[in-house]
Amino acid sequence: MNNPKKGALLYQGKAKSVYKTDDPDYLIMHFNDDATAFNGKKHEIVEGKGELNLRICKRIFEFLSDRIPMAYVETLNKKEMLQKNVEIIPLEVVVRNKIAGSLAKRFGKKAGSDLPFPVIEYFLKSDDLDDPQLTRSHIAAFNIANRTEMEIIEELALQINTILKHFFSVRGIVLVDFKVEFGRYYGDILLADEISPDSARLWEKQDESVLDKDRFRHNLGDLIEGYKIIAKRIGA
Ligand code: UDP
């Protein structure tokens, strides 16, 4: 397609800026060098992070693209991605293969153990409320998404997990958990936002060392070094 022209800033996220284009059906996502954690309470500029994240995300989206309906269209340059302008459903859909992060904390479980099957969780996208967890029943009652949409979302999230778990595993990386977002687009539900080491836990298979944003969250090593290992391993 002809590249749409970049327009006004539509939304300033924590690690991404979203711009309108001259075509209302498309928008441009700019990957910034900002690293944030704990709902923005920890914040640093990490030079090179935006470019690396975009490369990794592009590789993942293009790998998924023949099986998962998605907003992703193409990358435009080293820091920008063109996406369909979906109506974002304000849910963080988390799929987990191993116990880590908030799951370990909330339920007093040991991080690192395998789950017997993928566990799916929903959180409301709300910085003000600190992203509270939701059940499918809350989601229906609060009119966040209808039951048909949730059936599709759950199936897509689990399908993405199956594909990516294998994709990473054969490349020596464990997909511990990840967060995805979905949006509405002319009657379809599309995978939106990003999938990257900012939004997924990725561990080295050999020694379970952390390669993802937990390096930044918990001072576990150089962020860029981890992201570079991931990029290289997956051919991003
Ligand atoms: N996650 C995310 N954005 C959020 C919260 C979580 O991308 O606002 C991702 C996170 O990187 C991890 C997964 O979702 O891969 C599960 O996160 P968890 O609930 O364990 O929360 P955290 O430990 O990050 O607070």
Image (cartoon, grey):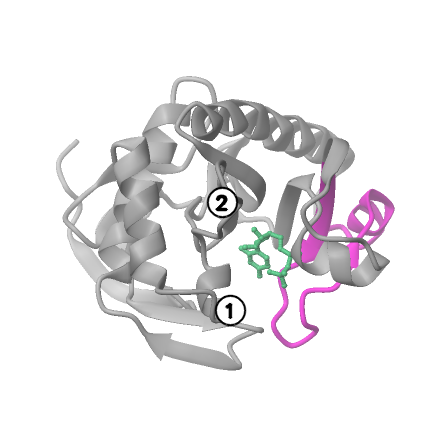
Q: Magenta residues, as a range?
A: 119-144
The residue tagged 1 is 217
Q: 125 above or below 62?
A: below
**Can you say which quadrant of the picture contains the C terminus?**
top left
Count of residue discs: 2
Amino acid type of the residue that numbered disc 2 sits on in the rendered structure: Leu
Kindly identify the residue that appears in the image at 39 percent across and 69 percent down.
Answer: 35
Amino acid type of the residue that numbered disc 1 sits on in the rendered structure: Arg
The residue tagged 2 is 202
The answer to whether residue 83 is seen in the rendering is no
Q: Position of residue 184 (x, y in %)?
A: 53, 39
Answer left or right for 27 relative to 107: left
Label 1: few (<14), some or many (≥20) within 10 Å?
some
User: Is the CB–ligand 1 distance for label 1 below 8 Å?
Assistant: yes
Q: Position of residue 144 (x, y in %)?
A: 71, 50
Question: Judging from the image, what secondary structure is the residue with disc 2 in?
Answer: strand
Q: 185 above or below 162?
A: below
Kindly identify the residue that appears in the image at 64 percent across and 52 percent down.
Answer: 91
Which residue is nearer to you in this view: 154 or 158? Answer: 158
Answer left or right for 129 relative to 127: right
Mark 2 to mark 1 CA distance (whole Å): 14 Å
Kindly identify the residue that appears in the image at 46 percent across and 18 percent down.
Answer: 67
Q: Position of residue 69 (x, y in %)?
A: 46, 26
Question: Judging from the image, what secondary structure is the residue with disc 1 in?
Answer: helix
Whether 130 is among the magenta residues is yes
Answer left or right for 105 relative to 94: right
